[in-house]
Image: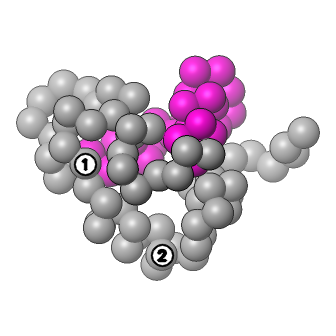
């Protein structure tokens, strides 16, 4: 069981990525998605990362809020209107 409140830093740790603030900012800046690409379908995720993202979003558990935040941040430069879909 995971006892800490999920944060973007812990989420990146769970995905096996560098979780320093600078690395997260760089990741978000260099991995922008168009609105037609759902977060979990992005080509840069491994299969296990995709599964982690999608399973927690579907469960609507504590990680779901962090998934939503990352989803929004990775779609910001390409947002035309409406919400970003997972």
Give residue 44's mark. Answer: none
* Residue situated furthest top in the rendering: 59
Up/down of 8 relative to 63, above or below: below
Up/down of 10 relative to 22, above or below: above
* Residue situated furthest front in the rendering: 47
Magenta stretch: helix, strand or loop mostly = helix
Number of marks in the rendered image: 2
In front of the other: label 2 or label 1?
Answer: 1
Residue at image x 74%, y 46%? 5
Q: Secondary structure at mark 1?
A: loop
- The quarter of the picture where residue 39 lies is top left
Up/down of 5 relative to 8, above or below: above
Residue 83 percent coordinates (x, y): 26, 27
Give residue 33's mark. Answer: 1
Crowd class of label 2 (few under 14; some 14 to 19; many from 20; radius 10 Å)? some
Residue at image x 81%, y 49%? 4
Give residue 23's mark. Answer: 2
Left or right: 83 with respect to 53? left
Residue 41 percent coordinates (x, y): 39, 38
Residue 55 percent coordinates (x, y): 62, 29
For the record, the magenta segment spans 49-75
- Report if residue 62 lies within the magenta region: yes
Residue at image x 39%, y 29%? 86
Separation (CA) of disc 2 from disc 1: 18 Å
Does the rendering let one see residue 16? yes
Up/down of 75 relative to 26, above or below: above
């Amino acid at each position: 069981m995971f006892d800490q409140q999920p944060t973007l830093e812990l989420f990146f740790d769970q995905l096996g990525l560098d979780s320093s603030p600078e690395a997260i900012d760089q990741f978000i800046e260099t991995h922008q998605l168009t609105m037609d690409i759902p977060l979990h379908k992005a080509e840069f995720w491994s299969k296990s990362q995709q599964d982690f993202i999608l399973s927690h979003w579907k469960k609507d558990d504590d990680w779901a809020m962090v998934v939503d935040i990352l989803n929004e941040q990775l779609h910001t430069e390409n947002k035309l209107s409406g919400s970003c879909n997972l």
